[in-house]
Amino acid sequence: MPAETSLRQTLSALRPMLADGGGRYAFFVASFFAVALLEVAGVGLLPAFIAAMNEPRALLGHAGLSGDKFFSQLGDEQIITIFGAALAGFFVLKNLLIASAVYFQASFVAARQAALSARLLSVYLHQPYTFHLQRNSSELIRNTTGMTFNVFGAVVIPGCIMLTESLVIMMVATLLLVVNPLATLLAIGVIGGVSLAFYRFFRARLHLLGERQQAEGGEMIKWVSQGLGGVKEAIILGREQFFVDTYARHVALFSRSNTLYQIIGMLPRLFLETLIVCGLVLVIVVLVRSGTPISAVFSTLVLFGVAALRLMPSVTRIVGALTTIKFHQPAVETVERDLAAGPSGRRPSRQASVRRVPLSEAIEARKLSYRYASADKPALRDVSLRIPRGSMAAFVGRSGAGKSTLVDILIGLHLPTDGTVLVDRVDIADNVRGWQENIGYMPQTIFLTDDSLRRNVAFGLEDADIDEAGVLRAI
């Protein structure tokens, strides 16, 4: 099993996946600071308003309006009404701004998520043919359609939640430190220490569960694909239940990992709720025993109570986000590894301008040898041949003799380990795409897309690029 990835390494790996969003990335980061500031403002204003209800004119002093002629003529009830309406208006505006920020964040993440999925598919499709022989297609499907969405839905979004809530906690803690340093430091020490211990206890288990879920998810896709792909043979031989039973075993392991993750994810809320209530009681005891007057305890208690109500979900979300990120770290590792292995540029497509390799004399192979990466011995050794233009050739031999490998080399799917393929005495390795422009290919195993006959004949072309006369000629 690979070494466990740290949270810092995971977040570092995510940065380039997000930064491709251009200038919107700066607004994406700034939006979290804006949300945190608005949340802290709400935490500070509400208890201040409640505490000032005993002395409404103190509100004028806090607002810098004690010398204002209009406000100085108002009664206590009118002052409370005006400031209450202002407070309510602030909360309406605050929550509208937060909702707008959350919408922007979600839109940004969704766009990057879609772009990453398409980018990973592009990396896979532009890999050499040998890459696809060595990797299971179900694994590539899982990574493209599942892992990329896990990267954002289960790592980036929880990471955003963690960033926002951490800023809120820092700012609220600063406010509480100003009001009562001793009680605040005591609460931070107890709650923070126990929360950190909780996360450290479960993080290794979460990473292991995430790796297991990722592996079993790939196996599930593989056995569904194999069962449905070989359904004709399964029905004829009566082997349907074999595929069902094998799939069911992997589903059971996948579901078990997911169940354990959900249980661990639920524990922080129950645990921290108890801890914060006990912490609030501890703050009251410390204030009373330190000789603080009951009237002062009440105003401080209001502030700590409102702060606790706001911080309890924040702490719960942070611990929950950490557990979610840890569980899905293997998804980030998988996507990062495959993106890093991708080609730096795109191979030219059939529609792109490519210099076609002419064929007027012959196709010639000189001392071709080829060894697959995982093979003990070469599939081909010192094969030489010449096929004149206009002639027909057939390769005949026992299974495993290298017929398909030889054809794959001649059409440019493999580059030979040794030797060369020449077309009119020109090495095709210098312009494989140009040589493939000449080739019509009928594979041993036919592949049809789930689409119309017309689009299958004009494989991989947009409707506007399809030559209708060419399709009819081919049919």
Image: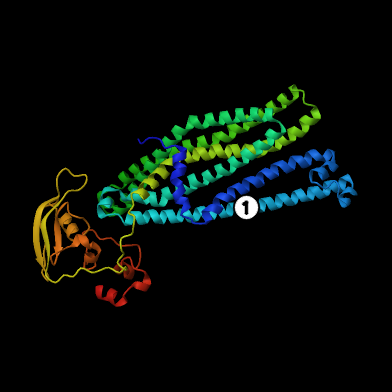
User: Could you say which quadrant of the image residue 290 lies in?
Assistant: top right
Picture coordinates of residue 42, whole percent (x, y): 70, 44
- Horizontally, residue 372 falls left or right of residue 248, namely left
Q: Residue at x 77, y 30 (%)?
A: 297
- Horizontally, residue 366 falls left or right of residue 160, namely left
Position of residue 28 relative to residue 422, above or below, is: above
Q: Secondary structure at mark 1?
A: helix
* The N terminus - image quarter: top left
Q: Depth check: 308 or 470 in front?
A: 308
Position of residue 461 relative to residue 214, above or below, is: below
Picture coordinates of residue 207, whole percent (x, y): 43, 36
Three-letter code for the amino acid on which mark 1 is drawn = Ala
Picture coordinates of residue 249, whole percent (x, y): 36, 40
The residue that disc 1 covers is 99
Q: Residue at x 62, y 52 (%)?
A: 99
Mark 1 neighbour density, 10 Å: few (under 14) some (14–19) many (20 or more): few
User: Could you say which quadrant of the image residue 272 lies in?
Assistant: top right
* The C terminus - image quarter: bottom left
